[in-house]
Image (tube, helix red, strand yellow):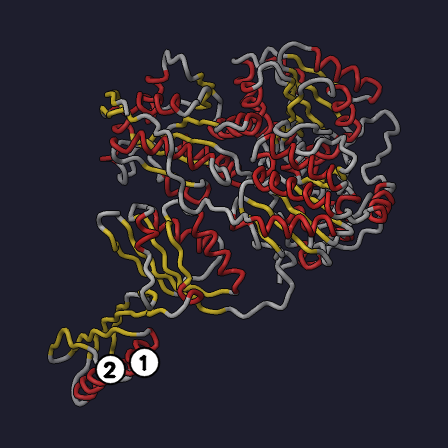
C-alpha cells in the first residue's frame, strides 16, 4: 500500500482516477471549491459543465448506460444536492451505477442551518442505493473506493458521498484502491445444478413458452445479451422485451415479438397471456408490463431470474426464483439446454407459432399515413430507416414520443437505447444524450423528444454548444403534453385540463440563438429530406417535426385491464375504464 | 382492493419477530425505519442497542405484521441495506425468547397502595422508587405479562409507562458468532 499525503480534495480526485473515472459531470459552488481546485489542470479527468444539477445526473446516467461504466457527478451543497435528487431517483429506479459527490458545509457548521446547508444524506437516503457523509478525513479514500463497489455490483444504483468542505481541505494519507473489496454479504446467489436442470427441462418441455427479458440483461453486459439470443435461437422460443431491455435481442431476430406491456405489441401481450411457461430474465414485473395482476399470464409456470432477491415474489409469485447475475445463469442454462437437447426431442412449437403468427397478422403497430400531415409513427419509422447504417444511440424524454420511439425504432444492440423507464422523468433525454455523446464522440446520438419534455431541460443546449457535441434533437412537436392529453381523452371525457403547451418558442430561432442548426418540417413530403439534412449536418441540430396533433399512442392496455383486453385503435370499442383503473397512474 | 394487488385469497397476517445485526453508525436506524414507512410495512415494536463495541455492531429486535409474502419481501428489502448484515426471522426459524422491560409509575394514596404492592409482588415487579403518593415499578417479561400488569395498575390510579420494546434471541446453542466474524 502506497501512502501519500495530499488534501482531502486531491485525494477524492485521485480516488476517482484510481476507479478509472475519465469524465465527471458537474456544476461548481461554494462547498466544492476545493474539489474544483483539485480538478483544475487535472489531465486525467475531463469535467463537463452542465447547466443544472439534475442534468448532471442524467448525463452521467446516459454515460453509464451506453458504456457499462460508472457515471460520475459533482455538485455543491444545498440547492446543488437537492437539484440532483430527481436524477438520483431516476438512477435508482432504472438501476444505473452513478457516483454523486456533493459538497457540504464544514463539519462544525452541520446542523446550524448554515448558508447552503441541507440534510443531503437525509434527503437522498430513500433515493440512493447507499450514501455517506464523510466526517472523518481518515475514512475518505476507503469510502470512495467502497462506493464504486456498491454502485456497480449486484443490482447497480446511485451512491452519494457528502463531503464537508473542511474534509476537502484537511491533509490526508492517500490510500490506494485495494485489489479486492469485500462484498457485502447480501450479494448471494442460489444457483445450483439441480435448479438449472429443472428450469431447462421446463423450458424444453413447454408447449407454449415465452421468454420475457428486461434491463437486467443489459446491465449484466453485452455477453448476457448474446447468451439470451443464443438461448432463444436454440429453443426457437418467442421472446419479448421490456422498455428497459430493448436491444438485448436484435429487433431483426425472427423470434422477437416486440416490446410488451401497456404499449406493447398485440402478439407479445397475447403470447404472455396465453403462455404455459414464462422465463423472466432480469425484468421485475413492473405494473406497465403486467397490467391487471389477477389476470396476468393466468395458466403459466413462471421462472424469474434476477440479481436482486427482493424482486422475486414482490408482485408476482413465481414457481422458481433464481437469484444471481443474468450472464452467469444464462450461460449455465444454455449449456444445460444444449445437453438436454441432445437427449430429448424439443417439444414441438408449431401450433404455438402458428397461433402467434395469427396475432401478428393483426398488425398492431399498423398506421395510415394519409394526407400531408406527418404521423409521428412515420417520423420515427423514417428516422430508423435513415439511420440504420449508423452506430446510432437513441435517448428519449417521457411520453407519447417515447413509446413511439420504442415501438418503431429497431434496436439491434444493447446499450444503444437510453430512456427513463421506472421514474418516467420528462427532461431526461437531452442531458442523457450529452453523456452518451461524450462517451461516443463519433457516433450518431439522437434525442427523440416531445416539445413539452424538451422545455424541461433545454438549458442543456448551452452545454451541447460549449462542448461541440453533434447531438440531433428530434422533436415530435404536437403542441400537447401528448400522453396526458391521450389519458384525458380516454379517461376524463376529453376535458383537456392544462395539457396544451401554449407559448412555445420558435425552435428554429431557438437553435439559431445558440448558434446551431434549426430545421422545421410540417409536410410528409419533406420529412425524409429533413431527416437527411439533420443527419448530414456537422454539429448539433434541433429538428422541429410538426406532427399530427391529436394522434394517440396504440396499441394500449387501458389502466386496470389485462393483456388480453388491449385496444388497438381509437375505433375499437373501448370499455369505460374501471373505477380501480381510474385510480392508477 | 387495488387491481394491482394480488387477487388470491389473502392469507392472514401474522406477527413476526425479526432480529437484525447492523453497523452501529449514524443513519442505519433511519434506513431501517425509512424502509418500513416508505414501503408501507408495519412496525409493532422496535428495540436497538449496541451489542459489540469492537466490531461496532448493534442488534435491532423488531416485531412486524404481515402475510408470509410481505414478510419475505421485508426480509429481502432489509438485506439490501448496506449496513444491515444479518436478518433472522426468529418466529420462522425456531424457538426463541422475547422479553421486554417496563417502568411503571403509579400515583396512588390510601388503601390502594397496599393492593398495588401486593400485585407487584405477584408479578415479581421490583419497586424502584417510593414516595407517600407514588411508586415506580420495574417489570420484565413477555409483552402480554407487561400489558396485564399495566392494566391492573391503571385501575388503581394515575399511571405513567415507559417500555423498551421487545428484545429477542433464539433458544439453544445456535449463535451468530461465525457469521459475525465474516463482517
Q: Is residue A374 left or right of residue A295?
A: right
Q: Position of residue A454 (x, y in %)?
A: 62, 27
Q: Where is residue A356, by image quadrant?
A: top right
- Closest to the observer: A435 or B135? A435
> Does residue A403 show up?
yes
Q: Position of residue A463 (x, y in %)?
A: 52, 18
Q: Do the residues marked 1 and 2 share a common chain?
A: yes
Q: Where is residue A477, by image quadrant?
A: top right
> Does residue A500 show up?
no
Crowding at dot 2, Cα within 10 Å, few <14 / some 14-19 / many 20+, comes out as some
Tell me the quadrant of the picture where the N terminus of chain A can be found: top left
- Closest to the observer: A223 or A95? A223
Crowding at dot 1, Cα within 10 Å, few <14 / some 14-19 / many 20+, comes out as few
Q: Position of residue A174 (x, y in %)?
A: 28, 24
Which residue is situated farthest in the bottom direction here?
Answer: B111
Q: Are marks 1 and 2 in contact (CB under 8 Å)?
A: yes
- The correct choice, above or below, for A124 with respect to B53 in the image is above
Which residue is label 2 attached to? B123
Which residue is label 1 attached to? B148
Q: Residue at x 51, y 40 (%)?
A: A155
Q: What subunit carries mark 2?
A: B
Amino acid at each position: 500500500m502506497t501512502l501519500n499525503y495530499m488534501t482531502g480534495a486531491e485525494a477524492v480526485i485521485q480516488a476517482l482516477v484510481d476507479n478509472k473515472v475519465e469524465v465527471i459531470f458537474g456544476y461548481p459552488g461554494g462547498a466544492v471549491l476545493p474539489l474544483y481546485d483539485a480538478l483544475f489542470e487535472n489531465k486525467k479527468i475531463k469535467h463537463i459543465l452542465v447547466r443544472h444539477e439534475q442534468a448532471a445526473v442524467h448525463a452521467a446516467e446516459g454515460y453509464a448506460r451506453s458504456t457499462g461504466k460508472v457515471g460520475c457527478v459533482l455538485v455543491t451543497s444545498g440547492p446543488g444536492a437537492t437539484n440532483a435528487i430527481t436524477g438520483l431517483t431516476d438512477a435508482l429506479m432504472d438501476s444505473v451505477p452513478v457516483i454523486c459527490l456533493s459538497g457540504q458545509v464544514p463539519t462544525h457548521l452541520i446542523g446550524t442551518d448554515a448558508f447552503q446547508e441541507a440534510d443531503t444524506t437525509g434527503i437522498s437516503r430513500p433515493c440512493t442505493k447507499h450514501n455517506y457523509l464523510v466526517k472523518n478525513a481518515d475514512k475518505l479514500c476507503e469510502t470512495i473506493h467502497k462506493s464504486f463497489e456498491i454502485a456497480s455490483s449486484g443490482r447497480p444504483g446511485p451512491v452519494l458521498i457528502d463531503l464537508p468542505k473542511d474534509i476537502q481541505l484537511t491533509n490526508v494519507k492517500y490510500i490506494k484502491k485495494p485489489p479486492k473489496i469485500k462484498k457485502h454479504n447480501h450479494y448471494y446467489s442460489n444457483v445450483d445444478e439441480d435448479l438449472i436442470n429443472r428450469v431447462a427441462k421446463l423450458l424444453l418441455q413447454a408447449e407454449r413458452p415465452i421468454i420475457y427479458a428486461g434491463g437486467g440483461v443489459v446491465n449484466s453486459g453485452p455477453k448476457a445479451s448474446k447468451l439470451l439470443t443464443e438461448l432463444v435461437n436454440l429453443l426457437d422460443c418467442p421472446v419479448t422485451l421490456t422498455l428497459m431491455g430493448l436491444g438485448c435481442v436484435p429487433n431483426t431476430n425472427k423470434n422477437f415479438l416486440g416490446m410488451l406491456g401497456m404499449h406493447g405489441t398485440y402478439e407479445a401481450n397475447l403470447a404472455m397471456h396465453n403462455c404455459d411457461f414464462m422465463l423472466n430474465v432480469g425484468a421485475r414485473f413492473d405494473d406497465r408490463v403486467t397490467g391487471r395482476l389477477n389476470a396476468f399470464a393466468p395458466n403459466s409456470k413462471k421462472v424469474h431470474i434476477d440479481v436482486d432477491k427482493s424482486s422475486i415474489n414482490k408482485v408476482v409469485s413465481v414457481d422458481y426464483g433464481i437469484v444471481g447475475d443474468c450472464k452467469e445463469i444464462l450461460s449455465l442454462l444454455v449449456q444445460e439446454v444444449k445437453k438436454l437437447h441432445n437427449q430429448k426431442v424439443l417439444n414441438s412449437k408449431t401450433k404455438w407459432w402458428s397461433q402467434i403468427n395469427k396475432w401478428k397478422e393483426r398488425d398492431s403497430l399498423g398506421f395510415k399515413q394519409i394526407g400531408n400531415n406527418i404521423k409521428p409513427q412515420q417520423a420515427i419509422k423514417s428516422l430508423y430507416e435513415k439511420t440504420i447504417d449508423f452506430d446510432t444511440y437513441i435517448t428519449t424524454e417521457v411520453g407519447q414520443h417515447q413509446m413511439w420511439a420504442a415501438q418503431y425504432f429497431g434496436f439491434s444492440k444493447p446499450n444503444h437505447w437510453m430512456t427513463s423507464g421506472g421514474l418516467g422523468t420528462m427532461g431526461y433525454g437531452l442531458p442523457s444524450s450529452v453523456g452518451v455523446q461524450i462517451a461516443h464522440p463519433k457516433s450518431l446520438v439522437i434525442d427523440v423528444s416531445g416539445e413539452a419534455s424538451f422545455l424541461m431541460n433545454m438549458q442543456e443546449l448551452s452545454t451541447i454548444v460549449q462542448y461541440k457535441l453533434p447531438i440531433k434533437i428530434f422533436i415530435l412537436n404536437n403542441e400537447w403534453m401528448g400522453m396526458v392529453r391521450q389519458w384525458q381523452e380516454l379517461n376524463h371525457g376529453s376535458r383537456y385540463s392544462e395539457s396544451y403547451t401554449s407559448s412555445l418558442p420558435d425552435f428554429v430561432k431557438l437553435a439559431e440563438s445558440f448558434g446551431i442548426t434549426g430545421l422545421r418540417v410540417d409536410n410528409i413530403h419533406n420529412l425524409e429530406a429533413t431527416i437527411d439534412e439533420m443527419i448530414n449536418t456537422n454539429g448539433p441540430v434541433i429538428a422541429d417535426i410538426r406532427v399530427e396533433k391529436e394522434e394517440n399512442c396504440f396499441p394500449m392496455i387501458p389502466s386496470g385491464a389485462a393483456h388480453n383486453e388491449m385496444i388497438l385503435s381509437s375505433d375499437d370499442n373501448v370499455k369505460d375504464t374501471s373505477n380501480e383503473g381510474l385510480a392508477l397512474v | 382492493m387495488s387491481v394491482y394487488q394480488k387477487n388470491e385469497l389473502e392469507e392472514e397476517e401474522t406477527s413476526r419477530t425479526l432480529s437484525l445485526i447492523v453497523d452501529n453508525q449514524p443513519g442505519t436506524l433511519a434506513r431501517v425505519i425509512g424502509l418500513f414507512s416508505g414501503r408501507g410495512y408495519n412496525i409493532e415494536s422496535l428495540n436497538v442497542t449496541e451489542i459489540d463495541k469492537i466490531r461496532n455492531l448493534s442488534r435491532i429486535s423488531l416485531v412486524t405484521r404481515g402475510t408470509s409474502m410481505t414478510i419475505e419481501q421485508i426480509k429481502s428489502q432489509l438485506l439490501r441495506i448496506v449496513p444491515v448484515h444479518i436478518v433472522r426471522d426468529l418466529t420462522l426459524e425456531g424457538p426463541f425468547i422475547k422479553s421486554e422491560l417496563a417502568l411503571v409509575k403509579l400515583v396512588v394514596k390510601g388503601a390502594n397502595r397496599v393492593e398495588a404492592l401486593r400485585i407487584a409482588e405477584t408479578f415479581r415487579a421490583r419497586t424502584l422508587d417510593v414516595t407517600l403518593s407514588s411508586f415506580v415499578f420495574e417489570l420484565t417479561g413477555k409483552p402480554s405479562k407487561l400489558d396485564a400488569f399495566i392494566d391492573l395498575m391503571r385501575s388503581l390510579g394515575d399511571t405513567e409507562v415507559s417500555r423498551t420494546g421487545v428484545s429477542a434471541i433464539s433458544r439453544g446453542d445456535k449463535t451468530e458468532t461465525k457469521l459475525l466474524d465474516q463482517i
